[in-house]
Image (tube, rainbow, N blue to C red):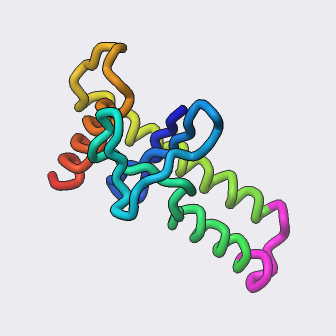
Amino acid sequence: SVCILANVDAPHCLMLGYDANGLPISSPSDGYHTRNGTNGVKFVQRTPYSEFIHSTLHEVKNLFSTMRMPAESCLEYIEDRLRVLYLKTLVVNNIVRSTLPTTPPTTPIFQQNSLIKTQIANIAAA
C-alpha cells in the first residue's frame, strides 16, 4: 500500500510505501525508487518533520508552562490549530483536484503522484 504525504506548509509531496509483506519500500541513497516504472518517485520510511505540528506543540507548552493558561484554554488552542490544519488540507485538495487532468482509474498510483507533484510545483512557482 502507498500513502501520499503532502506538506501543507510547503508545496511538496512524498510517498510512504509498504510491500505485500508489510515491509517498508526503501529508497536508494539518492531517495528515488526506480523499479517497476516508479522512476522519480521518492519513498520515505518515516514521515517527514512537520513545522506546523512542531510549532503548535511548542506553543501549547509555552501557553501552559510560561503563561500559566488553564488546560481547557490550551485544548481550545489545539482545537483551533487542528481546524487550521484541516482547512489547509482542503485547500491543497481543491487545488490539486482542480488542476489535475482526469486520469483513468487504471493509471498507476506512481504516475498519479508524479502528476500531483508537478501540479503542486507549478502552483508554488506561480
- Evaluate whether residue 88 shows in this view: no
Q: Position of residue 5 (x, y in %)?
A: 47, 46
**Image point 77% across, 58% down: which residue?**
75
Residue located farthest toward the bottom when viewing the structure as drawn: 66
Please indicate, yes or no, whether residue 42 appears anywhere in the rendered image. Answer: yes
Please determine whether, in this image, residue 112 is positioned above or below residue 60. above
Q: Could you say which is closer to the camera, residue 121 or residue 31? A: 31
Left or right of residue 73: residue 58: left
**Image quadrant containing the N terminus:** top right
Is residue 106 inside the magenta stretch? no
Residue 114 spot, x, y in % from top left: 28, 39
Looking at the rendering, which quadrant does residue 119 occupy?
A: top left
Of the pair 2 and 34, the residue shown nearer to us: 34
Q: Position of residue 60 (x, y in %)?
A: 70, 70
Residue nearest the observer in this picture, 34 or 115: 34
Please report the residue visible at 54 percent of the width from the left and 50 percent of the height from the top: 85
Q: Residue furthest right?
A: 71
Q: Is residue 110 left or right of residue 72?
A: left
Residue 71 forms part of the magenta stretch:
yes
Identify the image quadrant of residue 108.
top left
Tell me the magenta residue range. Answer: 63-72
Q: Say which residue appears at 73% left-offset and 75% top-offset.
A: 61
Number of numbered tags placed on the structure image: 0
Report x, y in % for residue 15. 45, 45
Nearer-the-camera pick, 62 or 10: 10
